[in-house]
Amino acid sequence: MNNLQLFHLAGLLYLGSVLTYLLHFFRPSRLLHRVSFSLVIGGFILQTICLAWRWKLAGFLPVTNLFSTLFFFSWALACCYIYFDLRYRIGASGLFVMLLNLLFIGFATRRDGSIPTLIPSLDTIYFSSHIILSFLGYALFAMAFSIGILYLIQKRFSSPLLPEIRLLRKLNEEAIFLGFILFTLCMLIGGIWAYEAWGYWFSWTIKGVWSFLVWLFYAGMCHAKFIRRWQGTGYAILSIVGFGVVIFTYLGIGLLLESNHPLG
C-alpha cells in the first residue's frame, strides 16, 4: 500500500462517518454516535500516517500544490472537529463538518498526488510553521462556517438532535477566536518569511491583499461578538460570509486569477 492508497482509505472512513452520522440524525443512538466518531478518529489517524509518510519522502512539509493543500486542509478540519467533539460532545453536528471535509477530499483525489520538489523561496525554517498555522486557522473558520449553518437551522427548527442554541453560539465564537489567533501568527511568520526570502515584510500582491482582508474580516468578527445586534444570528451569518472570503482567498485567486504567491 502506498501513501495515496492510505489517503483514499482515510477518505472511505470519513465517508462511513458521514453515512453513520446521517443515520444517527434520523435514528438517534449513542452507539451510532460512537461508531461515527470512531470512524472519524480512524480516518484522522490514517491521514496523519499518510502525512508523516509523505513528509518523510519529501524531506519537508509536503504542502506545495493544490492536492497537498486540500489534503492538509482536510486533515486540519478533522483535527479541529475532533477537538470540539471531545470537548463539547456535539454529536450529530459532525454530519455537517464531515460533509465539508469530504468535499475537500473529493477535490483532492482529482488532482495530481505526486510530491513536487521544493522551490528555493520555500526552503526556510518558517515554511512549515506558516503553513500549519494558516490551515489550522482556515480549518477553524470552516468549523465556524458549519456551526453558523447549524445555528440558523437550530434557531428555525429547534431540533433535539443538535446542540442547544447557546452552545452553538459559544462554539461559533470560540472557533472564530482561535482561528483568528492562529491566522494572526501565520501572517506574522509569513511577514518574517517574506523578509528573509525577498527583503520585504509585505507585498501588495493579490494573495497578500486578500490574506490581509481575511485577517481584517475576522478581527472585526472578534469585536462584533461584543455588539448586541451582531450576536447570535448576525454572528452566524458573518461566519458563513467570512468562510466565503477564505475560500476565495485560498482557491479562487489561484484558480481564477494570477498570483505570484509561492503556494498559488
Image: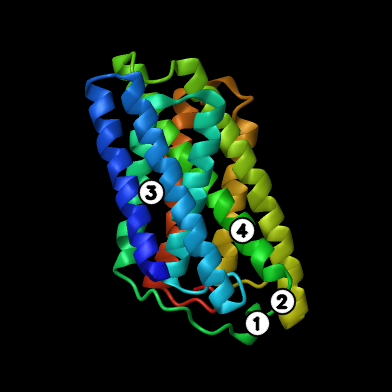
Of circles 4 and 1, the one toward us is 4
Of residues 156 and 3, which is closer to you in this image?
Answer: 3
Of circles 2 and 1, the one toward us is 2
Relative to residue 236, is residue 81 depicted above or below? below
Of circles 3 and 1, the one toward us is 3
Instruction: Look at the numbered discs 3 and 1 and tell me whether their residues touch, using CB distance below 8 Å.
Output: no
Distance between the alpha carbons at the discs numbered 2 and 1: 7 Å
Amino acid, disc 1: Ser
Q: Which circle's residue, 4 or 1, is located before the other in the chain?
A: 1
**180 lies left or right of 154:** right
Image quadrant assignment for residue 130: bottom right
Q: Which mark is residue 124?
A: 2
Relative to residue 16, is residue 5 depicted above or below? below
Amino acid, disc 3: Asn
> From where the camera sits, is residue 220 visible?
yes
Amino acid, disc 2: Thr
Q: What residue would you read off at disc 1?
A: 121
* Residue 94 x %, y %: 39, 34
Q: What residue would you read off at disc 4?
A: 132
Distance between the alpha carbons at the discs numbered 4 and 3: 17 Å
Q: Residues within 10 Å of mark 3 (few under 14, many from 20)?
A: many
Distance between the alpha carbons at the discs numbered 4 and 1: 17 Å
Q: What residue would you read off at disc 3?
A: 101
Of residues 163 and 49, which is closer to you in this image?
Answer: 49
Distance between the alpha carbons at the discs numbered 3 and 1: 30 Å
Relative to residue 102, is residue 146 depicted above or below? above
Instruction: Look at the numbered discs 4 and 3 and tell me whether their residues touch, using CB distance below 8 Å.
Output: no
Indicate the quadrant containing the N terminus: top left, top right, bottom left or bottom right. bottom left
